[in-house]
Amino acid sequence: MYRTFVFLHLVGVVLFFSGFSASLFLKFRADQTGERRILAHTLTQMNFNDRWLTPPAILLILVGGFGAAEVGGLSVTATGWLLWPLILFGISGAIFAGQALPLQLRLERLMSAPDASEGVDWAGYRDLSRRWTRWATVAFLLVSIAFVLMVFKPDI
């Protein structure tokens, strides 16, 4: 049963990181084109991913992780390499849900608006995009630190 929970946890981690890193990369590449249609499509796909693929990945991470800890006899609150990644994961989620995702949705609306084909507020887009990049990068770095803590299991 322990290996099953670890497997679920790892599948969730792979899905989560692949979705998160793909979004960062694809957004960066779409921004380089400067084309509204490409940006609109990319942002729509990112929002689809964050709505339908990321939540199951998070569920697998949590169910697998808590299940493995329970079956393995590990206390999450008394084991630093379990507790701190969980805290960082939660902070990352709060940052993403509270800051990056609303900006991402606004970016999609801005690029997908019917009247956007006639004239895009590129200054507004760049401002929102920079803010999104800052928040998404912070969220990504926090889960990356959590990942490192889980892999190397330091005595903290």
Image (cartoon, helix red, strand yellow):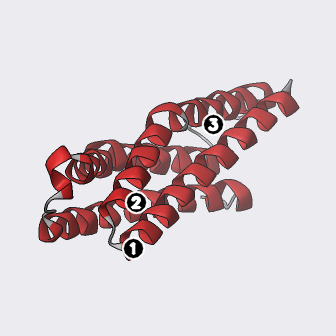
Residue at 28 percent across and 45 percent down: it is 105
Mark 1: few/some/many CA within 10 Å (<14, 14-19, 20+): few
Viewer-proximal residue among 141 and 35: 35
Label for residue 74?
none
Q: Nearer the viewer, residue 9 or 67?
A: 9
Q: Position of residue 124 (x, y in %)?
A: 13, 65
Mark 2 — residue?
A: 38
Image location of residue 136, percent across then percent down: 38, 59
Picture residue at 32% right of the left edge, 72% below the top: 34
User: Quick one: SS at disc 3?
Assistant: helix
The residue labelled by disc 1 is 33
Q: Which residue is mark 3?
A: 61
Type of amino acid at the residue the image marks with label 1: Thr
* 94 to the left or right of 146: left
Q: Residues under labels 3 and 2: Cα distance? A: 32 Å
Q: Is residue 35 above or below residue 41?
A: below
Nearest to N terminus: mark 1 or mark 2: 1
Q: Which residue, as the protein is rendered here, is positioned at the far bottom?
A: 32
